[in-house]
Image (spheres, rainbow, N blue to C red):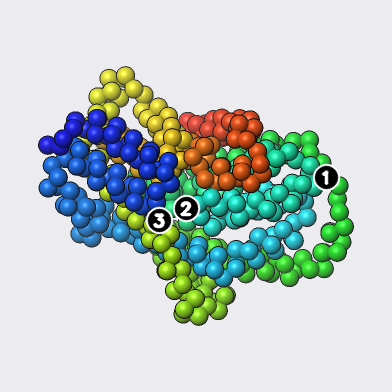
Amino acid sequence: MGLLDPPIAVVVSFCFLGVMLYKHVNLGITLNATAILLALLSLDWRNIPNIAYTTVDLTREDGLLAISVILATFGIMWLSQLYKETGEIAKLSESLSRIVKDPKIVSSVLPAVIGFLPVAGGALMSAPIVDSETEKLKLKPEKKAYVNLWFRHTIFPVYPLSQVLIVTAALTQTALFSIILLQIPTVMVMVIVGFLIGFWKVSYAKDERKSKASANTGSELKSFLLSFSPIMATIVVAVFTDILCCNLSKQGFDVLVATFAGLAVLTMISRLSFKMLLKPLESWEIYGVTFAVYGAFLLRNVMIAAGISGIFKPLVANGSLNFLILLTVIPAVLGFLTGSPSGAITISVSILADVLTFSSKNAALLYISAYLGYVIAPTHLCFTFTANYFKSPLGKVYKYVIPSFIITFASALLVYFLPFSI
C-alpha cells in the first residue's frame, strides 16, 4: 500500500507537475519525476522498478510499442536539429516567401511551414518574417501576434512527425493516420478561422516584387522542393508503410522507419559530413524530449497500477459523469493549466484507460481538446514569446484567440458526432 489514497496521491502529484512546468523544468525530468512521486505515494515502492522495466519490456506488446515511439521521437528530434544546423529550414522559409507574393498568404503559411521544426517557443522563428509581411497590411501588434501564434499551430494536428500525435496514437492504441484523417476538417476550420479573424477587410498596396521576381520563380520553387524533400520523404514512407504493413503501424514502427528515411534524404541533399551528422547528438534537447516520451508511458503505467481510472468508472456507469466530458473538458483544462499537450494527453488517457475503449474518433477528440487547451494557455511558450515579441499584452491577443478556440473546438465536436468511422 502507498502512503496516500490514490485520488489524494494524484492531486499531490499533479500539483507537483504544475509547479515543475511553471518553473520550466525540462519536460522529460518533469514527467518522470511526477510518475515516480505518484508511485511512491500510491503504490508499494518495491513495485516501482518492475513498472519502470515493463514500460520498455520488449517481450510485451505495450513495451515494444513504447520502445518504437521513443526511438521515433529520438529520430524526429535528430532530424529537426539537422534541419536547423544545415540551414535547410531557413532556405525553406525564404524560398516560400519569394514564391508567394501575397503578404496574407506568406504570413499564414510560413509559420505553419516553420512548424515542421518542433522546437519549444518556435513561433519566435517565424515572428520576424510575419512582422515584416503584416506591416504591409498595417495590422495592430495584437493581431500580428495572433496571426503568428495561430498559424504556427495549424500544422501539428495533421503532421505525422508530431511527437504529441505519435504519443497519442500509441497511448490510445489507435492508428496514427486514422487520427490524422479525422483532424483534417478541424485543421481546415482552423485555417479559415485564422484567415477571417486575422485578415478580415484588410487590404494592401501591391509592390513591384511580382514583376522583378517572376524570372526567379522556377529556381525558388526548386529550392523549396529540395529543402522540403526530407519532410516529404518521411511522410510518404510513413503513409506507404502504414498502408502496406498494418502491423508495423500498430507497433509504432511506421514513423520510426519513415523518420530515418527522412534523415537519409537530408544527409544526401546537404552532403553532410559524418561529424555534422552527429553534431545534434551533442544537444541535451534531443535526449530531454526522448526521455519525456518514456515518462509519458511510465506515468500511464503507474496510474493504471494505482487504479486511478477505476475511480471514474462507476461515475460513468451510473450516469453521474458523461464520458464526453472526460474526453473534452479534462484534457482541455489540463492542456491549459500545464501548458503541455503531452502531459495533458498522458494524464487523460491514464484516467480513461478503464472507462472506455478508444476508437479513432475518441482519440482524435481527446487530442484536439488537449491541444487547443495548450495553444491558448498563458504558460504556452509560443504564446508568451510571440506576445512579447510584438509588444502586445496577452489580454489583447485573447480577443482573437478565444473566438478561434470556440469555433475550432465546435468543429471538432461536429466531426465526432458525424455518423461515420475510420
x, y percentage for residue 259?
A: 45, 64
x, y percentage for residue 322?
A: 36, 24
The dot on residue 289 is 3
The residues tagged by marks 2 and 1 sit, at their Cα atoms, a distance apart of 35 Å
Secondary element at image label 2: loop
* Comparing labels 3 and 1, the label whose residue is closer to the camera: 3
**Occupied quadrant, residue 219:** bottom right
Vertical placement of residue 113 versus 265, above or below? above
The residues tagged by marks 2 and 3 sit, at their Cα atoms, a distance apart of 12 Å
**Occupied quadrant, residue 224:** bottom right
Task: Kindly identify the amino acid type of the residue bearing the numbered disc 2.
Answer: Ser
**Occupied quadrant, residue 71:** bottom left
User: Looking at this view, is 396 or 215 the one in front?
Assistant: 396
Give the class, few, some or many, for how many residues have Cα within 10 Å of label 1's Cα (few <14, many ≥20). few
Residue position marked by numbered label 2 in the rendering:
162
Task: Kindly identify the amino acid type of the residue bearing the numbered disc 3.
Answer: Val
Give the class, few, some or many, for how many residues have Cα within 10 Å of label 2's Cα (few <14, many ≥20). some
